[in-house]
Image: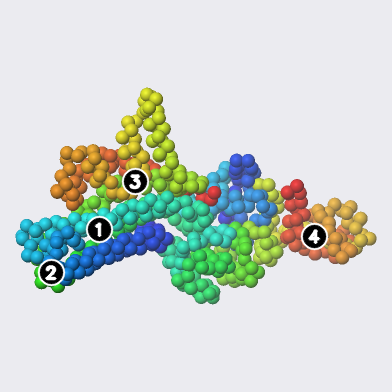
């Protein structure tokens, strides 16, 4: 099956900075891909390119369409939630549902109303009267009622409390995601998406520094809990990173031999946060 | 087509205050003034037993309840026709201000509050989005204005009829038959496209500013044409080739900034004073409308306006997020 998104040599320069430095990647259907990177690494620019919201150099095909020239057609198959507060403040909940239902051929009104019924949102409420969390609930209800093939989420839970954040991803998984759909998400709250991702992409200074499935990440990277007396031996294996916890050292290895690691101590799968921190070392230096 | 209707509806939701309620208030005020006029007339009548003809509510009240001559009754009809036009005219003045600010913010606010990211996440083209705003400004808004003004006018006519009835006059023969609401309505309908074409340069210019500039669209929209006009004047004063001042200001600056006012009327008066007959043309004569449509400046301005709308669409395509 052909890739859902295929990018070759994407390049985007702003006046003083290079946001995308010739990146290439593929996203296959039925995946949940996390695009993770520090501030200013080019995540949002990459998403904007995919959504047809910005110009760029290079080749990019999303569902076989060129987002630069075919944005309106593309948006029949692609949904998008940016960080909170992009719903206009004057819009009423009921009008939002009517409008999306009016212009979107793949919108299922009954489904949307079902989602809204689980919240405290009322049809007459205006967006300006809603809390951030409720705005996201509304946006999510609208988007989940659209039968799209690609959902792009850019920091969707920014500024929400923990209850809303948990509920957000839970709804996505339970009521939306299936084998026909693909989700591309960027976030700083890596711990929250860690368990739902199938693929991981790290981006830094406009370049992709890691692009692998979560399974591959689990095989390639290992974290070892080492007693102080064995620390020197561990360092000899050139770990990516080292940190101290309760008198023990935790080493992060990239592609090291499993048998050797097992001799040093207890092996675990590294958390994405730790992998991220180790990979991005020196970014702001 | 269905999408376009939703886009226009969207504009209406956002701007209901300016598009509908401002007109309702305007009509209400006109109606209130009429009512106060009638009450004053009543008071004067009771105090003096007769009424001098200075008090007008559409028609001179004193004549209305006296025994008007056929000539006076015919004059009532013309006066009522004129008030029908002026009810719509006053609404149009209010609308002109509303539209100026509506167009200036139409493509700017969505960038400032970033809701453009929501609108652009839907399968709607930039062209349709911008054209829906144009249609709101030159079709929907004037139609609402006309309807509300006519409702207010007929409410006034009913009040006046009650007043006549109260004083033994027959409103049908005194007021309803001598006036020509149907013909006036046809004239108003013929004037709608003319007003729309006339407005295009301002519509285009304000939308272009609204979609192109990073900040302060109001200042850009206002200062750029004014600066161009002043600069042109200075160049002229230095004896260098320049556009004649009257042309520059009347056909350039004023057309860019003020055409949401249906000023073709005044323009026609100013450029061809000899051709203007206040009695015949004062109430939107068919001849006047015809000459309005025949103005080259109307069509040239409309073309320039369309070009600027196209540019505004191109900017909306590019400027999704500042």
Q: Is residue B302 visible?
A: yes
Marks 2 and 3, how far apart at CA? 49 Å
Do the residues indicated by labels 1 and 2 lie within the same chain of the protein? yes
Which residue lies under the disc numbered 3? B258
Q: Which residue is mark 2?
A: B49
- Choose the circle earlier in sequence order: 1 or 3: 1
- Of circles 4 and 1, which is in front? 1
Q: Are marks 3 and 4 on the same chain?
A: no
The reply to whether label 2 and label 4 mark residues of one chain is: no
- Labels 2 and 3: the sequence-earlier one: 2
Query: In whole angstroms, how far apart are the C-alphas of marks 3 and 4?
Result: 70 Å
C-beta proximity under 8 Å, tags 2 and 4: no
Question: The residue tagged with tag 4: helix, strand or loop?
Answer: strand
Q: State whether residue A257 is above or below residue A24.
A: below
The residue at 62%/63% (across/down) is: A159
Q: CA distance from mark 1 to mark 3?
A: 20 Å
Q: Are marks 4 and 1 on the same chain?
A: no
User: Marks 4/1: CA distance?
Assistant: 80 Å
Above/below status of B188 relative to B318: below
Q: Residue furthest right?
A: A229
């Amino acid at each position: 099956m052909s890739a859902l998104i295929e990018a070759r040599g994407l390049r985007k320069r702003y006046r003083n900075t290079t946001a995308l430095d010739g990146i290439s990647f593929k996203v296959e259907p039925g995946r949940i891909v996390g695009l993770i990177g520090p501030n200013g690494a080019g995540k949002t620019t990459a998403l904007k390119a995919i959504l047809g919201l910005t110009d760029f150099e290079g080749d990019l095909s999303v569902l076989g369409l060129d987002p630069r020239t075919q944005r309106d057609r593309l948006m029949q198959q692609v949904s998008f939630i940016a960080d909170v507060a992009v719903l206009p403040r004057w819009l009423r909940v009921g009008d939002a549902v009517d409008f999306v239902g009016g212009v979107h051929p793949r919108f299922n009104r009954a489904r949307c109303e079902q989602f809204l019924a689980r919240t405290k949102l009322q049809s007459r409420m205006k967006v300006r009267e809603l809390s951030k969390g409720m705005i996201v609930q509304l946006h999510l209800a609208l988007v989940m009622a659209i039968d799209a093939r690609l959902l792009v989420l850019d920091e969707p839970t920014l500024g929400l409390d923990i209850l809303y954040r948990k509920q957000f991803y839970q709804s996505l998984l339970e009521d939306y995601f299936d084998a026909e759909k693909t989700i591309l998400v960027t976030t700083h709250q890596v711990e929250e998406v860690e368990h739902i991702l199938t693929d991981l992409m790290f981006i830094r200074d406009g370049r992709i520094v890691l692009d692998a499935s979560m399974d591959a990440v689990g095989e390639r990277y290992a974290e070892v809990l080492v007693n102080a007396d064995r620390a020197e031996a561990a360092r000899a294996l050139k770990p990516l990173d080292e940190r101290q916890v309760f008198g023990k050292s935790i080493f992060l290895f990239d592609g090291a031999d499993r048998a050797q690691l097992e001799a040093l101590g207890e092996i675990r799968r590294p958390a994405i946060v730790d992998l991220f921190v180790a990979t991005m070392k020196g970014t702001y230096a | 087509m269905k999408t376009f209707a939703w886009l226009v509806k969207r504009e209406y939701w956002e701007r209901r205050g300016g598009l509908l309620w401002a007109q309702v208030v305007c009509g209400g005020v006109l109606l209130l003034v009429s009512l106060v006029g009638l009450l004053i007339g009543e008071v004067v009548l009771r105090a003096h037993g007769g009424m001098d003809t200075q008090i007008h509510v559409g028609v001179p009240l004193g004549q209305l309840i006296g025994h008007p001559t056929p000539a006076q009754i015919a004059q009532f009809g013309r006066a009522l026709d004129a008030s029908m036009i002026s009810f719509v005219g006053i609404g149009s003045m209010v609308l002109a201000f509303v539209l100026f600010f509506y167009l200036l913010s139409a493509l700017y606010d969505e960038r400032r509050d970033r809701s453009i990211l929501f609108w652009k996440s839907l399968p709607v083209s930039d062209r349709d989005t911008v054209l829906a705003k144009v249609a709101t400004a030159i079709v929907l808004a004037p139609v609402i204005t006309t309807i509300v003004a006519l409702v207010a006018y007929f409410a006034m006519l009913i009040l006046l009829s009650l007043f006549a009835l109260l004083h033994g006059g027959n409103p049908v023969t005194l007021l309803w038959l001598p006036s020509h609401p149907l013909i006036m309505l046809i004239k108003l309908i013929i004037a709608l496209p003319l007003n729309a074409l006339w407005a295009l340069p301002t519509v285009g210019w304000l939308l272009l500013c609204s979609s192109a500039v990073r900040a302060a669209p109001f200042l850009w929209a206002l200062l750029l044409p004014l600066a161009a006009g002043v600069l042109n004047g200075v160049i002229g004063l230095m004896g260098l080739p320049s556009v004649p001042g009257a042309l520059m200001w009347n056909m350039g600056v004023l057309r860019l900034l003020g055409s949401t006012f249906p000023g073709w009327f005044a323009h026609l008066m100013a450029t061809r004073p000899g051709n203007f007959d206040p009695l015949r043309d004062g109430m939107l004569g068919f001849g006047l409308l015809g000459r309005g449509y025949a103005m080259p400046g109307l069509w040239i301005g409309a073309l320039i306006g369309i070009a600027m709308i196209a540019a505004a669409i191109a900017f909306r395509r590019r400027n999704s997020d500042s």
